[in-house]
Image (cartoon, grey):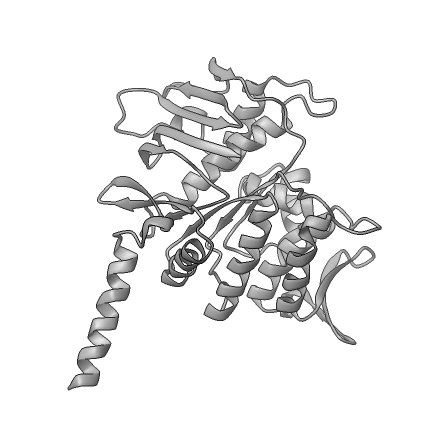
Amino acid sequence: MLESVVIKNFGPLADIHWQSLSKINLVIGDNGCGKTFLLKTLYSTMRTLEEYKRGQEQRTASEILVEKLYWTFQPDKIGDLVTKSATSPLLCAVCFAGNEFHYEFGKDTSRQISSIENKVSPRASNSIFLPAKEVLSLHSIILKSREQDKAFGFDDTYLDLARALRYMPRKGKSFQAFAQARTQLEHLLGGKIEFDDSAERWYFKKGNQKFPIGLTAEGIKKIAILDTLLSNRYLTTESIIFIDEPEAALHPSAISKLLDIIAVLAERGIQFFLSSHSYFVVKKLFLLAQQNDMSIPIISAQDNHWIADDLKNGMPNNSIIDESIRLYKEEVEIALQ
């Protein structure tokens, strides 16, 4: 697993020390605080480690990292990722399976990172980033935009996901460890999605009915993506999944069920990093931590600082929690009038 993270002067992330990471990890905070930015930073780092020395890859770790940062964040130059007010270089250090991957660079950096140290062994498993916006109805557009047009717009999180969905389901049983989670996902979906090669479009099948994916609810598409990546074995028991706003387009009851499935997958070996500003997500994960005596590290943005805690220890102090409590008190006051 990814065990700890230190980030300094990386865009909106001025100073983050997040230790003792676990199977499920949560980032919360207000809009614009850098939640998605943090997930993309970790994703870019892990994808660099996965692409390095894989297959016939000839690029160095530094060259892969530069490309990943460039196409994930899409700056004019890599140095633009350094915090504007910073007087010291950008730094990112992660500890993975007891070994460290570390890099840093300054504002003048263009296309080469010279300060990089990698002690992490090459990875066979895949990480994936699931964005808040749906991807299935844009699948062919994303691939054309990036693979043919080489245009900015859809970043690498979208491209990597579109490519991962292109893997066709393999014959035979999927990983036995995922059997329970896939059954729950398919029950939650109430159907399944399929890709039509001739039409180059995704469809949702429910019973004998078949619907174009564009006419399908956003929440179904989100859940279907996870089910597809399990069925085509792009994800394995050592994968890392980054999910931006798992609550997007989902009813609270569906959020609860999805997080139950995530807990099952986490027990089977997949590591999760979630970013959210939903009270339902925080509360459900808190209950999972309490019920299962499970560590769920949480880091929250508070007054331009990042505070780390663990939901196993209780609900954290945060504006999301505070606003939920304020609304509850307001409701009680109205009821008592």
Question: Relative to 148, is 101 on the left or the right?
Answer: left
Q: Position of residue 74 (x, y in %)?
A: 48, 35
Q: Between residue 110 and residue 158, name the one nearer to us.
A: 158
Q: Does residue 140 show up?
A: no
Q: Residue furthest top?
A: 114
* Residue under the point 65% across and 68% down: 187
* Residue under the point 73% across and 52% down: 231
Q: Position of residue 152 (x, y in %)?
A: 54, 39
Q: Between residue 33 and residue 72, name the one nearer to us.
A: 33
Where residue 261 sits, quadrant-wise, is: bottom right
* Residue under the point 54% across and 32% down: 46
Q: Position of residue 67 (x, y in %)?
A: 56, 27
The relative height of residue 53 versus residue 142 in the rendered view (above or below) is above
Q: Between residue 244 and residue 263, name the one nearer to us.
A: 263
The number of discs equals: 0
The relative height of residue 283 versus residue 103 in the rendered view (above or below) is below
Q: Does residue 333 show up?
A: yes
